[in-house]
Image: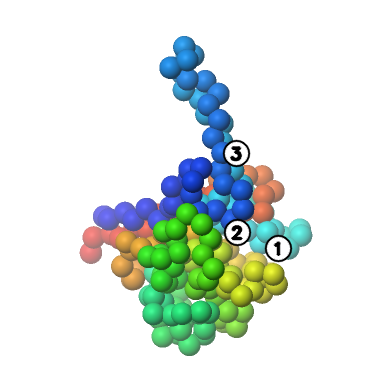
């Protein structure tokens, strides 16, 4: 069994949309305390994280009530590394996405913008039309390798988010797929159980089992 950890490390200098994480030392052995204790200040959408439908739809499913069957199970890592701009329906069909419930989009983001400490001026995102196609295909979880699945040209209207989350899909963002070959895996994606939250940071792994 081979395990690929697709989770970004969380630390104060990491790539982040907005305010970066902060760490406070509450207790330390060096200061004569009984143990080392830290307090972290970070947003629900820090690092590798899950967007629940409640992120864009009031009254929709929050992250603590997501179906674990959608977060754990067979998944495809689709090769979209040749795509520039928006991922289209044609790109998804060519990558063999049809028929899969859990889809991770490996793009040029993994080896490029995802490795930077500041937000890039542009990145590969999902077109609204492709988002609609994913819904029609019965996809339950869609992931991408950047801060957002949204195109850099639509971060004011958030079209793909409205389409996907409005239909109840789960979005996984900031999945580090740089070292993961395209193919078929078992996904285990477990967001923290933040009650009634719009999303949560998650530990996500891909498992390739021996034949």
- In the picture, measured across the screen, residue 187 lies left or right of residue 151, that is left
Q: Position of residue 177 (x, y in %)?
A: 39, 63
Res 186 visible? no
Q: Secondary structure at mark 3?
A: strand
Q: Work out whether mark 3 precedes mark 1 in sequence or the reverse, and give the earlier one.
A: 3
Distance from disc 2 to disc 3, alpha carbons, whole Å, reads 19 Å
Q: Badges 2 and 3: C-beta atoms under 8 Å apart?
A: no
Q: Badges 2 and 1: C-beta atoms under 8 Å apart?
A: yes
Q: Which residue carries the number 2 mark?
A: 51
Q: Which residue carries the number 3 mark?
A: 41
Residue drawn at x 43%, y 17% is: 30
Q: Secondary structure at mark 1?
A: loop
Residue drawn at x 34%, y 71% is: 182
Distance from disc 2 to disc 1, alpha carbons, whole Å, reads 9 Å
- In the picture, measured across the screen, residue 160 lies left or right of residue 25, that is right
Q: Work out whether mark 2 precedes mark 1 in sequence or the reverse, and give the earlier one.
A: 2
The mark found on residue 56 in the picture is: 1
């Amino acid at each position: 069994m081979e395990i690929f950890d697709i989770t970004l490390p969380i630390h104060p200098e990491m790539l982040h949309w907005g305010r970066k994480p902060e760490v406070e030392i509450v207790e330390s052995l060096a200061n004569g305390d009984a143990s080392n204790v830290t307090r972290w200040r970070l947003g629900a959408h820090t690092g590798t994280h899950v967007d629940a439908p409640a992120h864009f739809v009031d009254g929709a499913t929050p992250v603590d009530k997501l179906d674990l069957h959608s977060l754990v199970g067979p998944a495809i890592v689709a090769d979209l590394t040749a795509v520039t701009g928006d991922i289209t329906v044609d790109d998804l069909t060519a990558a063999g996405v049809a028929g899969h419930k859990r889809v991770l989009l490996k793009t040029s983001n993994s080896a490029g913008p995802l490795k930077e400490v500041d937000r890039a001026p542009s990145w590969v995102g999902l077109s609204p039309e492709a988002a609609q196609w994913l819904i029609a295909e019965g996809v339950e979880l869609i992931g991408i390798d950047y801060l957002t699945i949204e195109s850099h040209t639509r971060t004011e209207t958030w079209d793909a988010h409205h389409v996907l989350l409005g239909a109840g899909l789960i979005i996984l963002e900031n999945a580090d797929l740089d070292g993961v070959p395209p193919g078929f895996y078992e996904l285990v994606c477990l967001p923290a159980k933040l009650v009634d939250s719009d999303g949560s940071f998650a530990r996500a792994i891909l498992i390739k089992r021996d034949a």
